[in-house]
Each structure stands twice: as structure tokens, then as C-alpha cells.
Image (cartoon, rainbow, N blue to C red):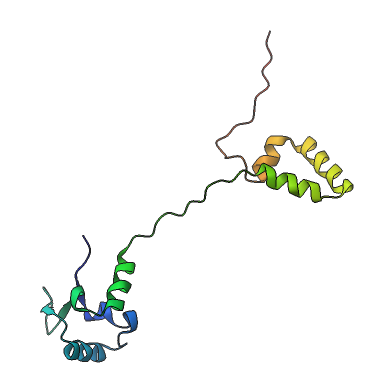
Amino acid sequence: MKKEWFATSELVGIGGLPKSRQGLNKRAREDGWEKRRRKGVQGRGVEYSIHSLPESVQQSLLLMQETPGEYSAKPSDMLPVWMQIYQQLSVSEREKLISYIMREGVYATLKQLGLCSPSTSPITNETSE
């Protein structure tokens, strides 16, 4: 459930509101924001209803309450990209790349490029008797 009541300290400076408690309370009085006494607090602490706040403040508060979504990018097919990179290499660079792959192995090269997950194991050479 989304929070519907906000203390003065939570609203200061949000969405263009005044940056001081006094300024915020003055604005609330002038605009007639719905308020209630804060529970469990001594003194004159009040909370303001989100429904009586200006639209820009409501939007800012709602954005602050949202849990950020997980970022996930779709893995793209890297073969065309690597083919294009390979085509742009000079003959000397191509020879060095092929030599490196032959020396280090395809699996190690893919792992270094981030194209193999750590859980993926290389193909094992099994000999049959």
C-alpha cells in the first residue's frame, strides 16, 4: 500500500515546495492542504494528505515510493558484430587474433570476451576404450 500521509520533514523541497519547514507550513495554510496530527509525536507535528498536495509534488512522491525495476538487456547475437570487427582488421591483426585463439583456446577467448557464462564448462575430451 502506498503511503498517503507525509510529515513536513518529508515534504521540504520536494517538487518545488519551500525548502524550510516554516515556508512549507505557510504554503500548506495558504493552499488549504488537508492535515492531521502526527501519531506518537509530541508537540504540534502534523502530516499532510497526498491528495491535497499540488500535482507536481504528488508525482514526485509517487516516483520516490516506486521500487526501481530491474534493468535487463536482451543479449544480442554477437556473431555479426564480431564478423564485422574481424573484417576491419588488417591481415597482420587477423593472423595475431587467430594465433591467440589457437594458443588460448576458443573457450578461454569466449570467456574473456564475456560471451560464456562462468557456469558453462568447456567441452571435455573423452577417450573411448
Count of numbered circles in the view: 0
Instruction: Identify which residue is drawn at 60% across, 31% down.
Output: 121
Residue 33 image offset from top left, x and y in percent: 16, 82
Quadrant position of the N terminus in the picture: bottom left
Q: Residue furthest top?
A: 129
Relative to 65, residue 82 above or below: above
Residue 44 image offset from top left, x and y in percent: 12, 85
Relative to 43, residue 75 above or below: above
Quadrant position of the C terminus in the picture: top right
Determine which quarter of the picture holds residue 99. Answer: top right
Instruction: Identify which residue is drawn at 65% across, 41% down.
Output: 111
- For residue 129, side relative to residue 9 (left or right): right
- For residue 92, side relative to residue 88 (left or right): right
Residue 46 image offset from top left, x and y in percent: 15, 80
Instruction: Identify which residue is drawn at 81% across, 39% down.
Output: 98
Q: Residue furthest right?
A: 92
| Nearer to me, 10 or 74 | 74
| Nearer to me, 54 or 5 | 54
- For residue 126, side relative to residue 69 (left or right): right
Instruction: Identify which residue is drawn at 78% across, 46% down.
Output: 86
Relative to 68, residue 87 above or below: above
- For residue 116, side relative to residue 45 (left or right): right
Residue 55 image offset from top left, x and y in percent: 27, 77
| Nearer to me, 73 or 126 | 73
Determine which quarter of the picture holds residue 16. Answer: bottom left
Determine which quarter of the picture holds residue 8. Answer: bottom left
